[in-house]
Amino acid sequence: MQSVLSTVFEVQPDSKDMLVARIVQLRQDEESLVGPQGEKYGRLKVRVPLLHFMALSVFEDDRYDPILVIETNFDGPPGPFWAQLEAAVGEDLRAILRFCERPSGPTGALFDRVVAADSRQPIAPLLEGHSFQPLIVHLGNRGLDRDRILREADLFHAARTILADADRTAPNPYRSATSATAIHADLRGALLASFPWLDEPAPARIPAHENRSDWLRLGGFLALLLLALSLPGVLLGLMLRPWWVAVLLSLVAAAAFAASIRDLGDLLRFFGTSDGAAPADARPRPTAGSRLVTALKGSAGVVAVIGVYLAIPSAAAAAVVAPLTGAGFGDIFRASAQVLGAGLASVPASALAILWWLRRLEARDASHDHPRLDEGKLRAMMEREDHIAQNHMGSLVLVKPGVLRAVLLRVGLRGLGLVLRVTEWARRGYLGSMRTIHFAHWALIDNGGRLMFFSNFDGSWESYLDDFIEKAHSGLTLAWGNATGFPPARFLLLDGATQGRKFKAWARHSMTVSLFWYSAYKDYTVDQIERHARVADGLRRRSLTKEEGTLWARDL
Amino acid sequence: MRVEGVGPRGRPGGLKGALAGWMMRSLPAVFRVLRAVSPVLRIGDTVVVTRYDDVREVFLNDDAFAVPYARKLDVIMGGQPFFLGMRDTSDYRRDTAAMRTVVRSDDLPALAAEAGRLAAEAVRAGGGRIEVVNDLVREVTFAVLGRYFGVSDPPDGDLRIWASRLFEFQFADPGDDPDLRAEVDAIAPALRAHIQGLIEARRASGAFGDDVLGRCLDRQSRGDPGFSDGQIRAALTGFVVGGPPQPPMVVPQALEQLLRRPAELEGARKAALAGDDALLLGYVLEAMRFDPLAPTLPRVAVRDELIAAGSRRATNVREGATLLVAFSSAMMDERRVPDPRRFNPRRLAHEYMHFGHGLHTCFGLQINHAILPMMLKPLLERRGLRRAPGPDGHLRKRGAFAERLEVVYDPE
């Protein structure tokens, strides 16, 4: 299990520059502490083995005091990670926190103790108390812990070294091998002594309990969503006769449909083609027969879900109410099912009404097409980019006002996050058809007033944003469309990030300098890590079939 | 040679001893419940602290939570202050700094080698069967450290007995046993006189020698602060009482834990055979985590103080209260220690608190790290290492003290 947390502290405005200098000093210190292979950031690599990525950023805003954000991506639950981090850089973090404001909440007393002169108060509880989970997370190499990533990379390089045949005067046995399975057997034999873990089965990347939990959470979310959307129908069903309910809902639906009809076609077309967002290698092209089977299965599933949705609460209501009132179980059951049915019938009307409301808001939204970029800040950001195969992006934006935005932002991001947890291609690291993100997340701060985005990705910032624009614009618009100044969007999915120039300017303007940024495996892209994993998985097996061997050997 | 009765007196045997043993064995489960239900438990004037964060906090807050050792140390030292009983004062800093100039990290390789050599001799002499507590670990520890400190056996007594009795009096006698006190009243002045005699004899010989005593006298001759006769005597007494009695407790306990886990025993054996001393130390420290030196260490609140501020378990501790700081529980706290019930010889240093934490972290921590694994290494290197048949093959304790553990192995 990988965890993503953000830890936020407000900064004393007068101390901002000193804070920045202290963070830069930490960066320089860590760069100078080399690891076992002479690499920079050796202390963090050795003493915080749970850590994948970490960044310290300071965001400035004319309307708020600056904030310090510690972004952490790590393995396992948070507790042991904070203990490791404290043991490695606790005193540096204590020095950094001394430039922050005392929190007003329950952690204020603890903060005082942590930052007091000569304090030795443990710092992990404070960091833990100020950290929070994001609304949505995307993982590039889900289920691979840091040690496994490094271990499998070492294995891959060892295999490559053997294949490269150091003695170039002698015939390379692997070139003359008759088949991929023979190469597999030879390589496994040669590597087993140095990598004894090849004899052990690979830990499941998504254990059964985690898979169950993902689906249960998504199911719970959808049930709550259904309940919320059916609430108007339920209320009307309790007050009015069924035919009045039907008339009222039809009127609302018709009015909302009529008001949004110009754009609804685009939305329907989007959903009709949205599976195109999945990566090419992740989706087998369906035949007409398989489409029919899928449609039938889907319909049967929907009918079954509706049946369960109506039957269980109705039976429960009847079981409770019938003995109390003396009415018949069947009567109560039928009445309850009728009300719930009215609720279900109101779902389309509710959805259309929300879409209509949203379109009204979107039509009146202001955007920020030409944000003014501070040249110095831009230069500082760019100086920190493109040093290694990966880059880092941290962004903070204001959220558009209004209750609908507040609800949609939370529901949209939470729902998208839960869908990403169960979708096969997202589980394999794809966002749309791009697989360049190691860890990315969105999180709300200031009671939902501001939206943070952090990403650790492969390649340059320009190519990353281009990927977003071309391959994942709808998800991005859903996540960011509720932020002020975002390029105009429709229905939170359409347009928005497709307006490349405006979107890039807006995104760059929202960013800050990555003052401190650590990657535990700076040379590896998401794809490369998956390649290492495939090679390792193959080598873990004692033998491969001819077809498996051919596929496996492609990664060597 | 088997030596009987050199260990601490320990707790009585029989039903009372069995009951005490059962209670000690139950403590991990009790702590587990406390960590979840009542992490900072107050019973009258006693506060039991069980979570990793709170244990660290108490150890690190020595301004408010002092060690309660001075009263008994005064008995042992005859009133001469020793840094183990001090608070973080200039005297404490001077004395510890002085002793760090004579107990040096560059001594560690030689100490480790000597411990390994003597242990190998003992294992060889055992001829396929050895009693680990006394015949291996106690013998080797006292021989290595006695020579290193420059403190030989007294002519009229046994240093192992004297040190072990004084250790028990200082650290494991919460009930102030009058019989033990009577013994201490005889042993403590005799040990002080013995060490003073060694100081004077060495000074009179004109050759200081390169052990801790010799280095102290060299510093004294140069007029360095912290090296009066009284200070040297107290330091050597403290080292002898606080140091060598501990390995005969923890090393057999570690071996017992390894014997219970065949896969881990095999891992430790491979590390020993490969000469990977760092990994072997990892096995020993990890085995000790499942049966550490003691369940708790005591502290006394010298002012009113809050523990775990800002959390729901925040607890006010009143001045004068006794704190039982459960470092054994902290090392099993899944809130900070990853997968604590799994045996993992590659844990990080911060996951262990075997040697205390903060101001009074064991002065001999590095020495222990150097010699503890070396005493097991020759045993682990032997083929067929296993428990001796019968009850002798299982670690027997008296109270908190290891008393007997016999193992057999293939003779060379």
Image (spheres, coloured by chain):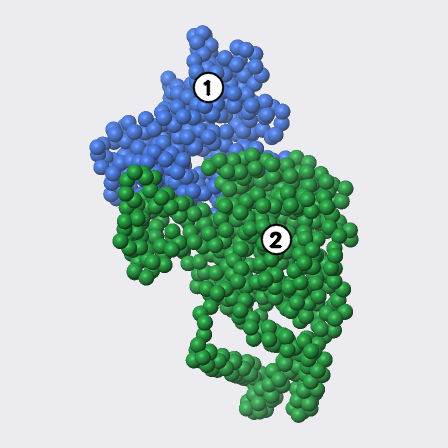
Chain colours: A green, B blue
Tell me residue B68's x, y (percent): 56, 34
Tell me residue A282's x, y (percent): 46, 65
Question: In front here: A122 or B186?
Answer: A122
Chain holding disc 1: B
Tell me residue A132's x, y (percent): 62, 55
Tell me residue A439's x, y (percent): 55, 54
Chain holding disc 2: A
Q: Mark 2 Cα within 10 Å, few/some/many (few <14, many 20+)?
A: few
Q: Amino acid at mark 1?
A: Val
B52 vs B124: above or below: below
Mark 1 lies on residue: B212
Mark 2 lies on residue: A462
Q: Amino acid at mark 2?
A: Glu
Question: In front here: A386 or A139?
Answer: A386
Q: CA distance from mark 2 to mark 1?
A: 65 Å
Residue at the location (57% across, 38% down)?
A: A30
Residue at the location (58% across, 45% down)?
A: A386
Question: In front here: A494 or B22?
Answer: A494
| Helix, strand or loop for disc 2 | helix
Q: Mark 1 Cα within 10 Å, few/some/many (few <14, many 20+)?
A: many
Which quarter of the rendering shows the N terminus of chain B?
top left
Q: Where on the picture, by quarter, is residue B405?
A: top left
Residue at the location (67% across, 43% down)?
A: A380
Q: Is residue B257 visible?
A: no
**Callout in the foreground (2, 1):** 2
Residue at the location (27% across, 34% down)?
A: B130
Count of all numbered marks drawn on residues in the image? 2
Q: Where on the picture, by quarter, is residue A491?
A: bottom right
Q: Is residue A25 visible?
A: yes
| Helix, strand or loop for disc 1 | helix
